[in-house]
Amino acid sequence: MALADRPPWQYLEVAVRRSRIDGFGVFAAEPIPADAVIGEIRGEAIPVAEARRRAEGQRRIMIVEVSHKRAVDATRSSDPMRFTNHSCAPNARLALDEGRIEIRALRDIAPGEEITVNYGETHHEGRLECRCGAPNCAGRL
């Protein structure tokens, strides 16, 4: 996809495809330099209480809590960054900037490499096995 054809919140070229970590993942389609903003996670703004209700009992959750009051549910979004999987040794991070949920590279990311972030505390509350495969894997999400 040419830069002119990308939505304004998708800054760098990525591809969504099957992931060895879980389901689908988002992969670099071009070299990504350290600290670059790759794209944004976009979705429905909802109260945290509603986010927790929606997440209950779900294995795949595409919800990010951005404050103690507000969350973003990307379940119905067409945004490719919603497929960003967890890793205990991530190559990117979530960053909040003026209400936007950005994915920023922690280091250079090569084309074809899966883009991952550390989810931190999750709605899974330690009940879901982590499958990131990192040497320092915590084992659970």
Image (tube, rainbow, N blue to C red):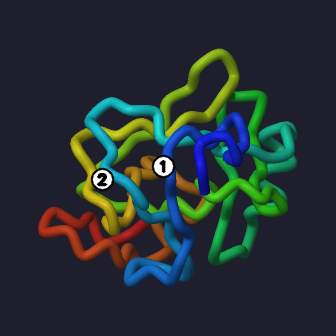
Residue 65 on image: x %, y %: 66, 40
Left or right: 38 with respect to 114? right
Label 1 to label 2: alpha-carbon separation: 15 Å
Task: Identify the secondary structure beneath mark 1.
Answer: loop
Mark 1 burial class by Cα count in 10 Å: few <14, some 14-19, many 20+:
few
Q: Is residue 105 above or below residue 79?
A: above
Q: Where the C terminus falls, by quadrant?
A: bottom left
Name the residue beneath numbered marker 1: 121
x then y, percent, for residue 8: 70, 35
Q: Are marks 1 and 2 in contact (CB under 8 Å)?
A: no
The residue pinned by badge 2 equals 90
Q: Position of residue 79 (x, y in %)?
A: 71, 54
Q: Is residue 113 above or below residue 133?
A: above
Which residue type carries mark 2?
Pro
Residue at 78% across, 51% down: 73
Q: Residues within 10 Å of mark 2 (few under 14, many from 20)?
A: some
Mark 1 or mark 2, whichever is nearer to me: 2
At horizontal 48% and vertical 79% (from top left) the residue drawn is 22
Give me the residue at 60% from left, 57% from top.
Answer: 1
